[in-house]
Image (spheres, rainbow, N blue to C red):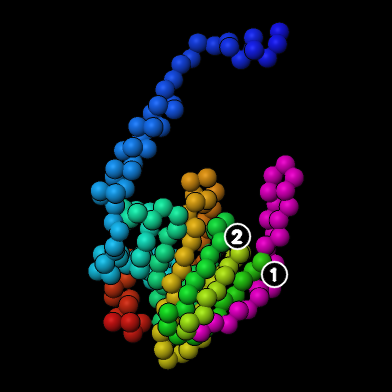
């Protein structure tokens, strides 16, 4: 039996390709007609998350034209630290206000039959201040610290969301920020930490 005899066996039929053409046309129509091209500040939702107080600027659930990244502003009160987390996508952030530092626990991994991950015991310290841009490699454990005991800090965090579509979002919260209570209103916390 040759390859042709094998490949022509079976009775299943589908219209996957044709469906894709129709779905693409519907997506393009929705993209240009219904998705937000400008997100006003008042429309950006706040969140009190285990990672910290966030204002989502672009997120896949916000119906914007952006398909590749999520962006949020993180608020760090005077002397406050974020939670500690890791995620498979790399992260970059811009320091909009304040000064501080990051701790990064680099990851070593091996691939055999499955992935093996090991994080370094001692973190590397990276200092930052207003105007700086900070890169965090994929799956590195990290935490942000506002080093100023008297003034707040704000960072604009950008994550690649393409890995999520590939089945590799892998967000893991290792520690919540100190004092995290999921019932606290983020707007009240902004006032408490001197942002409002």
The residue under label 1 is 121
What segment is highlighted magenta in the picture?
107-129
Q: Position of residue 42 (x, y in %)?
A: 24, 69
Q: Principal SS element in the magenta part?
A: strand
In this rendering, the answer to whether 46 lies above or below 26 is below
The residue under label 2 is 139
Figure quadrant of the N terminus: top right
Seen from the viewer's position, the closer of residues 3 and 81 is: 3
In this rendering, the answer to whether 67 lies above or below 75 is above
Q: Is residue 97 magenta?
A: no
As drawn, is 165 to the left or to the right of 46?
right
Sequence-wise first label, 2 or 1: 1
Asked whether residue 149 is in view, the answer is: yes
Picture quadrant where residue 24 is located: top left
Q: Tag count in the figure?
A: 2
Q: Which residue shows up at 38% across the image and 56% down it?
A: 66
Q: Which residue shows up at 52% across the image and 68% down it?
A: 92
Q: Which residue shows up at 39% across the image and 32% down it?
A: 21
As drawn, is 160 to the left or to the right of 26?
right
In this rendering, the answer to whether 119 lies above or below 22 is below
In this rendering, the answer to whether 69 lies above or below 17 is below
Q: Is residue 119 magenta?
A: yes
Q: Position of residue 107 (x, y in %)?
A: 67, 62
Q: Which label belongs to residue 8? A: none
Q: Secondary structure at mark 1?
A: loop
Give the alpha-carbon distance from disc 2 to disc 1, as whole Å.
15 Å
Asked whether residue 179 is in view, the answer is: no
Picture quadrant where residue 118 is located: bottom right
């Amino acid at each position: 039996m040759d390859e042709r005899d094998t490949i022509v066996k079976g009775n299943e039929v589908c219209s996957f390709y044709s469906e894709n053409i129709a779905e693409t046309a519907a997506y393009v129509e929705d993209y240009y007609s219904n998705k937000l091209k400008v997100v006003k500040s008042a429309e950006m939702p706040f969140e009190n998350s285990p990672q910290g107080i966030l204002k989502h600027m672009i997120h896949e659930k916000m119906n914007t034209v952006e398909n590749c990244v999520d962006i949020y502003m993180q608020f760090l009160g005077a002397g406050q630290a974020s939670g500690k987390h890791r995620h498979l996508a790399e992260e970059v952030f811009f320091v909009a206000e304040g000064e501080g530092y990051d701790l990064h626990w680099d990851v070593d991994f091996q691939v055999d039959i499955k992935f093996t991950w090991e994080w370094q015991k001692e973190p590397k310290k990276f200092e930052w201040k207003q105007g700086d841009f900070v890169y965090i490699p994929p799956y590195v454990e990290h935490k942000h610290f506002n080093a100023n005991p008297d003034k707040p800090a704000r960072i604009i965090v950008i994550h690649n969301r393409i890995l999520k579509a590939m089945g590799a979002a892998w967000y893991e919260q290792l520690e919540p920020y100190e004092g995290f209570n999921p019932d606290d209103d983020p707007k009240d916390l902004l006032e408490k930490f001197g942002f409002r």
